[in-house]
Image (cartoon, rainbow, N blue to C red):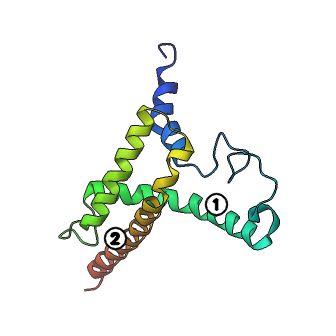
Amino acid sequence: MVENPAKYLGWYLLGKPFSLWQWGLIQSHDEIHIYPIRKSIFTSAQLAKIINQGSKAAHVALFPLAMIGVILVASGINRSSTQRAPYLAVIVAVILTYWSILHTALLSLPRYGIPMRSLLYLMAIWGFYTLINVIELKFRQLRGRRTP
């Protein structure tokens, strides 16, 4: 740690949180099952395979939106400068931030992020909605300045 502090700082600030929220389980047999199995709907049914791959792709897209949502809540940015983030968004952001800090300090295995995925996706939806509204508001302000 003394020889390369930037490496460890990067690991604790980025690596461990990303490890906590990644899709696949590190210690698992495959992406879904921890232990080897004989038969599963996710290995035999084509629709289940498609659902699994769609969920994985959605997770990759929703994770950054959730982080944007947490940043927007923390910065106080909402649809306009006079509105604050809804209490539910603040509560979800606090829970996700606490969970990330706790597991970054301790053990950040992806299996510990699974119970929080519903909140992660809820924050992603709120973050996307708010980001679109903020961008739309900025465009309206720019358009309003150009018209004489």
Q: Which residue is mark 2?
A: 134
Q: What type is the residue that disc 1 sits on?
A: Lys
Local crowd size for mark 2, using a 10 Å CA cut-off: few (<14), some (14–19), many (≥20): some
Q: Position of residue 15 (x, y in %)?
A: 53, 37
Of residues 57 and 42, which is closer to you in this image? 42
Cα–Cα span, label 1 and label 2: 28 Å
Which residue is depicted at the point 29% across and 58% down?
91
Q: What type is the residue that disc 2 sits on?
A: Val
Is residue 117 found left or right of 148 in the rendered image? right
Element type at mark 2? helix
Which residue is depicted at the point 51% across and 57% down?
63
Local crowd size for mark 1, using a 10 Å CA cut-off: few (<14), some (14–19), many (≥20): some
Q: Which residue is mark 1?
A: 56
Seen as rendered, the residue at the extreme bottom is 148
In this picture, is 22 found above or below 88? above
Seen as rendered, the residue at the extreme top is 3
**Where, quadrant-wise, is the C terminus in this rendering?**
bottom left
Please identify, in this view, whether the residue under mark 1 or under mark 2 is nearer the observer: 1
Q: Are marks 1 and 2 in contact (CB under 8 Å)?
A: no
Which residue is depicted at the point 29% across and 85% down?
147
Q: Give the label on residue 124, or none.
A: none
